[in-house]
Image (cartoon, rainbow, N blue to C red):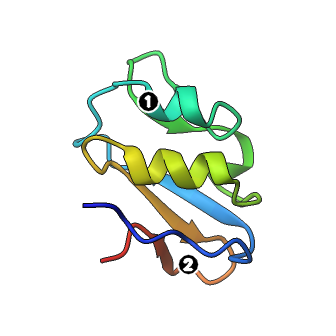
Amino acid sequence: MTAARPEADAGPVVVRVDRDRCIGSGMCALSAPGSLALGDDGLAEPVADYADGGAELTEALAEAVDFCPVEALTLYSADGGYRIAPAD
């Protein structure tokens, strides 16, 4: 099942990683290296502003969230805190 695509004008976003779900496949870090990386423990983690303050939603980040094999990534609005993707 494919998640709904977040809107390009969503404003700044933050990405959260469910570390209990993440299996460290690295697909997210390969497809959105400016937004996600694998940490020392081998699990995904957001980089720079995507962790806290929010940064621009990129097509690569939207695809990384959409294609995570275990649905461990979630996008939230940095301004309103509401969930953007994947859809509930």
Identify whether 71 is placed above or below 81. above
Sort mark 2 into few (<14), some (14-19) or many (20+) by Cα contacts within 10 Å: few
Q: Secondary structure at mark 1?
A: helix
Q: Nearer the viewer, residue 72 or 60?
A: 60
Three-letter code, disc 2? Gly
Residue 81, numbered circle: 2
- Quick one: label 2 or label 1, which is nearer the N terminus? 1
What amino acid type should be assigned to the residue bearing mark 1? Met
Question: Residue 60: horizontal and vertical position, in percent?
Answer: 63, 45
* Percent x, y of residue 33: 65, 30
Residue pictured at 32% horizontal, 48% vertical: 72
Left or right: where does residue 76 sit relative to residue 18? right
Please say if the residues under marks 2 and 1 sit with CB atoms less than 8 Å apart.
Answer: no
What residue do we see at 33% from left, 61% from top?
Answer: 2
Rendered-image quadrant of the N terminus: bottom left
- Horizontal relation, residue 34 to residue 85: left or right: right
| Mark 1 crowdedness (10 Å alpha carbons): few <14, some 14-19, many ≥20 | some
Q: Return the residue at label 1.
A: 27
Q: How many marks?
A: 2
Label 2 sits on a secondary structure element that is: loop
The quarter holding residue 81 reads bottom right
Q: Eyeballing the image, is 21 above or below 3?
A: above
Residue in the picture at 47% in, 15% down: 40
Q: Residue at x 30, y 77 (%)?
A: 88
Q: Quadrant of residue 27?
A: top left
* Residue 37 visible, this orientation: no
Estimate the x, y position of residue 46 in percent, counting from the top left: 57, 41
- Label 2 or label 1, whichever lies nearer to me, is 1
- Tell me, yes or no, if residue 25 can be seen here: yes
Distance Cα–Cα, label 2 vs label 1: 25 Å
Say left or right for 74 vs 1: right
